[in-house]
Image (cartoon, rainbow, N blue to C red):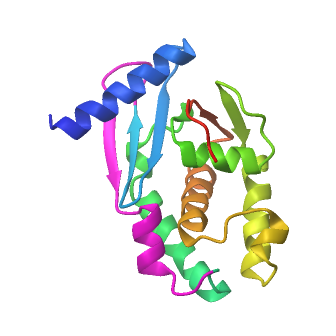
């Protein structure tokens, strides 16, 4: 087992301990160059699943304009969907989706979720933030929607949306301690 795999498994174990639950967990980590999913069945051996999509990497590779143009964003959706669907059999969808990501915490805050030690963002709340991004892609100023005009943010939100949608996660629990500016 390599060091990164061990660290991801430790992060999942820490999230399980903080939540004080025994149900199956799936942790989503959307980093800059790739995304990693750690999925287990009730605390048993977890699977670490790297995906070839990351917030900065995918923004750099898939988007040419800031904010993205509608057609290029639709093409990005296809690439993100394909990568998630490629791994769907390896991910325990009958589990609780969790993260310790500050960036996903920021999305939850933009969705109007109150900051707390444990934040729960339902898929509908995340979809409302995505709708605001869609309005920006259609030409509305990002400042009027209160979201970052940043392609990395757009891709991170897209990955989260497609992950929750295609794997049928109704909510994500966020346990990120640090403040989001």
Tell me if 108 is positioned left or right of 128 in this view: left
Q: Which residue is found at the position 70% from the left and 33% from the top?
A: 120
Q: In the rendering, at what x and y percent does residue 21 appear?
A: 54, 14
Q: In the rendering, at what x and y percent does residue 24 appear?
A: 49, 24
Q: Quadrant of residue 94?
A: top right
Q: Which residue is found at the position 47% from the left and 62% from the top?
A: 55
Q: Is residue 168 visible?
A: no
Where is 59 relative to 14, above or below? below
Instruction: For the N terminus, give its image quadrant.
Output: top left
Residue lying furthest left in this view? Answer: 1
Q: Is residue 110 magenta?
A: no
Q: Is residue 65 magenta?
A: yes
Q: Is residue 115 visible?
A: yes
User: How many labels sit on residues?
Assistant: 0
Tell me if 82 is positioned left or right of 166 in this view: left
Depth check, front residue: 59 or 49: 59
Q: In the rendering, at what x and y percent does residue 71 appear?
A: 62, 88
Q: In the rendering, at what x and y percent does residue 168 appear?
A: 62, 46
Depth check, front residue: 6 or 95: 6
Q: Which residues are magenta?
A: 40-66
Tell me if 5 is positioned left or right of 77 in this view: left
Q: Quadrant of residue 122?
A: top right
């Amino acid at each position: 087992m390599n060091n990164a795999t061990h660290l991801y498994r430790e992060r999942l174990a820490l999230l399980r301990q903080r939540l004080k639950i025994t149900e199956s967990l799936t942790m989503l980590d959307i980093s800059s160059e790739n995304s990693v999913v750690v999925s287990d069945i009730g605390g048993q051996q977890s699977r670490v699943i790297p995906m070839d999509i990351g917030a900065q990497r995918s923004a750099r590779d898939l988007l040419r304009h800031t904010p993205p143009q509608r057609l290029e964003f639709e093409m990005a959706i296809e690439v993100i969907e394909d990568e998630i669907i490629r791994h769907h059999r390896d991910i325990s969808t009958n589990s609780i989706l969790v993260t310790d990501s500050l960036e996903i915490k920021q999305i939850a805050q933009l969705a109007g979720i109150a900051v707390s030690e444990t934040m729960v963002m339902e898929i509908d709340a995340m979809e409302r933030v995505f709708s605001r991004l869609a309005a920006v892609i259609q030409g509305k100023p990002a400042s009027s929607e209160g979201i970052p005009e940043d392609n990395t943010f757009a891709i991170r939100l897209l990955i989260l949306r497609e992950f929750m949608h295609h794997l049928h996660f109704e909510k994500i629990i966020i346990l990120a301690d640090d403040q989001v500016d």
